[in-house]
Amino acid sequence: MLPPLDAISAAFPEFPLMRLRRAVVALSLAIAVAMAAAPSRADAPLIGRVVDPDGQPVGKARVFIYTASVRIGTSPYCPSCYPDCRKTADSDADGRFSIRALSDSLRFRVLVVAKGWEPRFVDKVDPLEGPVEFRLTQRRAETTDPRHSLRGQVLDPMSQPVVGATLEPYGYSRGPSYMYFGPSGGTDPLGVTDGQGRFSIALGDTGVGWFIRVRARDMAPLLLSRQPASATPITVRMRHGATVTGRLLRDGRPLAGVGVGLVQTERAAQFMAYGHDEIATDERGRFTFSNVTPGEDYFVHGKMTTLRDFGALDTIRIHVRGDESLAEVGDLAVAPGRRVSGQVTMSDGTLLPPNTRLLLGLDNAFDAQSQVLDASGRFDFHGVPRGRVVLHVMVRGYRFAPASTGYADAYGLAECSASGDRDVEGMALVLEPDGPR
């Protein structure tokens, strides 16, 4: 059991209280993770080979257990918080490797890096399914044209190389009034740093400033905003980020095993470094988000699909200050949620297609629940938090009609919404043929 925080602070007066608080939270989490994620059998090894496109062995490749996820149910731990995520192995001359004593309750995201080969991520690797084979591709020759490339090195706060950092070019700006987000011809969708933290990515369009999202295990996501291509290598310095923690209660008691989300309040694509993350509460009802990008406002919200049997959690707004800070949101009460119900009908009298699904999403968070409409088009959502919710239904050739309850034209897309802190019953959602009006 850890000593009280006041005792720790008194013993180490030279350390700021906030950093001590963050360290205590991190240590408590690490202890809990080590206990919960211990292998349930003596040895669940990951065994396999690293090969080239022709099936020939690749020696001296390093295989990393990058992140993990539970095989069944939910987890209160971040994907890189499990002890197994520190394990690695090198392939021998025959390309063979073995990583011992992995938890058989987990599946893994694996990173493979080797000099002269493109780094490769492999998702949902399951040691219980037997030997695996990771096939690498030859690293392409770096272009020398500065208009079409960006290269450099990613470093951690101690100026050490970050292996397996990802760099995602997802849009660009051409002057102050034009921005584009989406795939771009000739641009690498993702770059991954090698064993020395170095990267090289191709950038298709010239004369523009790129938006590049950088992510790395145990680091806060960051955004290279309007980054031009450059013949000169750049250095990207990561930060550990902040910690956001709190506790969910229902009737004054901890609520375990339910989902909590954290999302940036600023949704414009050119500002979204962190984006959205979610995690489950532990047996004490506590949730902890690590490596949160600092200097941003966030919404903390409950996940409706996991809270529906208990009630709902109202969305709250918080500000996350500097690097290595701790944002303690305190105890959050799960209370009875709202009910949103009604019926979807077709204006031309036709029947709804079978298995038509209606989606209800929170306006200020990345969270939704859905239902399959019955034969009469009726729906009945429970566990809906207070505030504005938006409803969507997809029927080919139809759209919401202006006669629908809560109708609005949002940038050319018809939607229906419901606001407030009380039940909303008897919503009439009308679908009309999607043609010119």
Image (cartoon, rainbow, N blue to C red):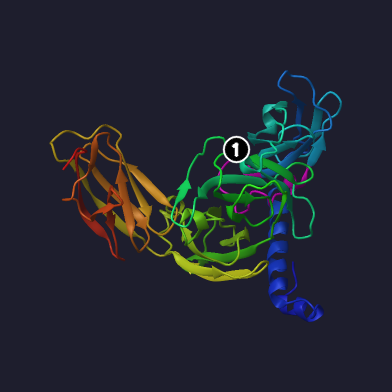
Q: Main secondary structure of the magenta part?
A: loop
Q: Position of residue 41 (x, y in %)?
A: 74, 38
Which quarter of the rendering shows the C terminus? Answer: top left
Q: Quadrant of residue 417?
A: bottom left
Q: Position of residue 298 (x, y in %)?
A: 51, 64
Q: Identify the secondary structure beneath mark 1.
A: loop
Residue in front for this viewpoint, 383 or 154:
154
Q: Is residue 125 visible?
A: yes
Residue at which label 1 appears: 188
Q: Position of residue 305 (x, y in %)?
A: 43, 50
**Residue at position x 59%, y 50% in the image:** 213
Residue in front for this viewpoint, 133 or 170:
170
Up the image or down, 336 lies above or below 63; here it is below
**Residue at position x 35%, y 64% in the image:** 386
Up the image or down, 230 lies above or below 94; here it is below
Q: Is residue 38 visible?
A: no
Q: Position of residue 207 (x, y in %)?
A: 55, 47
Residue in front for this viewpoint, 148 or 417:
148
Tell me if 270 is positioned left or right of 18 in this view: left
Task: Kindly identify the amino acid type of the residue bearing the numbered disc 1.
Answer: Asp
The range drawn in magenta is 68-87
